[in-house]
Image (spheres, rainbow, N blue to C red):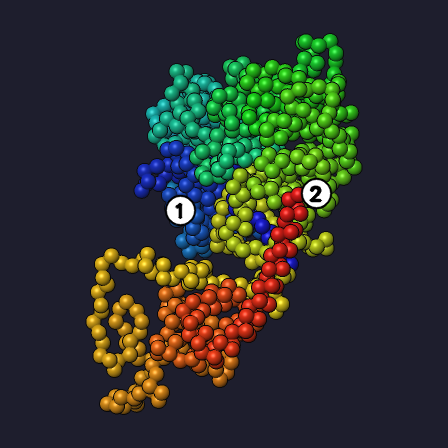
Amino acid sequence: MAQTSRIFKSSKALGYVSNHIPLVVRYIRCRKENLVVTCVGKAFHTYACSRFTLLSVSGLHSGELTCIAADSYHVYTASDNVICAWRRGTELKHTYVGHSSPVHLLLPFGPHLLSVDENSVLKIWDIKSQDLHMELTFDSVTFRVTTMLHPGTYLNKILLGSEQGAMQLWNIHSAKQIYVFKGWTSAITVLEQAPAVDVVAVGLASGKIILHNLKFDETVMEFMQDWGLVTSLSFRTDGHPVLVSGSLTGHVVFWNLEERKVMSQLLGAHNSAVTGLKCLPNEPLFVTSSPDNSLKMWIFDMPDGGARLLHIREGHSAPPSCVRFHGSNGHNLLSAGGDSSLRIFSTITETFNKSLGQASYNRKLSKKKRKGLADPLKMPPIVQFTSETTREKEWDNIAAVHLGLATVTTWSYDKLKMGELKLLPERFDPKKSHLKVNAVATCLCLTSCGNFVLVGYSSGHVDKFNIQSGIHRGSYGHPYAHTGSVRGVATDNLNQMVVTGGHDAVIRFWPFKSPGPGALKEVNIEESVSFFRPHHDSSMLAAALEDFTIIVMDLDTQTVVRKFQRHKGQLTDATFSPDARWLVTAAMDCTICTWDIPSVQLIDCFKVDAACTSLSLSPTGDLLATTHVDYLGVFLWSNRTLYSHVSLCPMSDTADMPLLKLPTTLGEVQEGVEVETDLDDSQPEYKSDDQISNDLVTLSLVTSSRWKNLLDIDIVKKRNKPKEPLKVPKAAPFFLPTLPSLNLQFDLSKTTDNEETNKIKMPADLQCLSGFAQLLSEAAETNIFQPVVAKLKVMGPSAIDFEISCLAPQSGGSFDLMLQFMRLIESMLISNKDFELAQAYLGLFLKRHGDLIASERQLRDYIPKLQSCQATGWESLQAKLFYGLCVTQSLKGM
């Protein structure tokens, strides 16, 4: 069984930036730059702080990362109970194995690495030798380690914070406990070294922030964060006495340590908890990360001492539900997620990723009055959208349907923002209509010209809007286009026809320009329609039905031309290949199938871990983009058929489907990752035989330039005659044989070491035959002409003309050689092989020696045999050609 898909191979994942693991900042002296390391599941990313460019992606770990730490030389990661040390973000240098439970804390400490697992077992490793230096075990009931810190200037000392609120100071060199701080009744969540010696900042789960002097065991000052648990702390080191704290609600607070009060607040810095926060050394900058899949850099340049956003890298904070390629080059993806945002992802580089913002009922007011996580003006998530490139420079070119709303929003790809228009018919607007109709938009379509949007509603209405002005331009049906919900709407490429499908299991065709009550045609189908997916270039329309089947309609003939059945769950999406030969479908049964439309066969199918919610094939056909349940990224799969030979034979109903892992952000196979095995097709690669059947005429594979101009070789030579006379090469002695070439080369193939060189041997018959003539004369005894034909195939037109001309007696040949050549032609005609070569060679032979053949009885009597063989072959070929022409003409007349 093949362990991979026949067509698609995992490429990479887009849109992953960070998760709940706190970020790490490290300074690289040779680059003179700070680098930020964030976790993305089983790997970590390294960003440069200058422009937030992605520098590297690490190799994959066996499981999800549980914590990250770094120093000037390594990045340390923990996955389950295994610790790894990486150089340059990609090279695995060391591995530390010894913990019995998952590791959740790491701390580089000079030549040692400290690690703490969930059972509060602290191990000290020698970084270079990977040996275990020391081990300390704590009782999780009385002192469960939650954080640790090396206090500045404290030689060989570490400070441990616990879930019970107490702190302990240990000497790791002597393995002795130095001091126990009674602490506080709340769990310690974070410890941070202050710029002042002996002072550390302690963050508690109760929201308290305490600056504590370790030397005297005294609290210097105390703050209270209003939003609960303190997730992160960091001090400015650029000369300003400021402490920055993060919270679970996504807010950031700046504390003035001299005045002992709040200096400023950054509300809604993230949509989720600020789990990572770090001020850059000696710079007015700090970076934050969050489980909302974003990484942000802030700069302190506000009048009140606060910070503003400087750089950002972000993806969807909720799983995307719809993805589509935009443009004709296949470099950009549009995706909409559960966070109500619309984003652009580049398949080339993450630097080109952009955000069009979140959907809002009032975009301007939402920007001004947004004070935190809950935005009352935020619209529900986008469940479906459509885009066109025709008019994107002039007005909005994206239309989107939102969950549970009848309002359709417009967006501008060129301006990277949400449009001002909200498309809503008056019948559904409570401000303009007294009728209370609880309808929601269920499907939409943007015309190829980029001027009109057609929207279908759950009430059965289908309306047309002008996307430039938002004006309602008419409705299809009187008063409804369908009985029940409208599930699909599409137009043809020339805006002559509108196609709608509904819950009533009817597909209707309407005139585009004159919306009205009458439909042009109705097609009754077996089940209700789930969605439409058109292919404008071929006038084909795929319609998914609720019985898990999908049909393909031809919009020109308005008939169902194909039907596919294989899925065992609700269909979620479908997409055509650019040439409309394939249809790729996805369903809730976690399968992705590829159908060959002309043959109505399933040619590829594979399973994934999570059901695919949306998919799209690039306009160039090289990439397939998918989104999946509970995954924040957009996954790319490359098309194997573009760069390798793939046997696309139909899959049987009982064939097993391989389970493929989703692509990773790495995009390449690294050491330690299993390489996908080659496809194990049940059928070997087909190789065509030299001759399929003896009763069929077979042509050769010789290029036409070697035989097509043989009859006109004199004209070709005259046309190609050089203007200047050719320089005659220096003649060789008459007794040394030469090879025919532009350069002087001697033919020493028949010389032997023991041959006497002082004697001149002459042929017995005083004939000096060429290589071709020798092969031809040898065939007289064996009647095997394949070597002679092979010799002719590799010769050029001039060489063939020369050899055939030299067969005559006056040119050094003989009548026996001429008769032997005629037998060669006869054998080629009888075998039905190389038919066009035999005709060309025979024509040239008759042209050169026609008069001589007519005068020589031996040759003249052999002509009827050649004529009979030639007529038999031509009649067979002529019958096949005439049959093919008749069938073609008959199909054209239908």
Mark seen at residue 768? none
Residue drawn at x 45%, y 38% is 349
Does residue 451 appear in the picture of this structure? yes
* Image quarter of residue 402: top right
* Image quarter of residue 764: bottom left
Side of 174 relative to 79 (left or right): left
Does residue 229 appear in the picture of this structure? no
**Residue 470 in the image: above or below residue 243:** above
Residue drawn at x 38%, y 20% is 301
Viewer-proximal residue among 873 and 851: 851
Q: Quadrant of the C terminus?
A: top right
Viewer-proximal residue among 609 and 506: 506
Amino acid at the residue labelled 2? Arg
Mark seen at residue 88? 1
Position in image of residue 641 (x %, y %): 54, 51
Q: CA distance from mark 1 to mark 2?
A: 54 Å
Position in image of residue 497 (x %, y %): 65, 27
**Residue 94 in the image: above or below residue 458:** below
Q: Secondary structure at mark 1?
A: loop
In this figure, which residue is indicated by the disc labeled 2?
562
Amino acid at the residue labelled 1? Arg
Residue drawn at x 64%, y 51% is 886
Viewer-proximal residue among 28 and 850: 850
Q: Quadrant of the N terminus?
A: bottom right
Residue drawn at x 40%, y 43% is 71
Which mark is in front, 1 or 2? 2
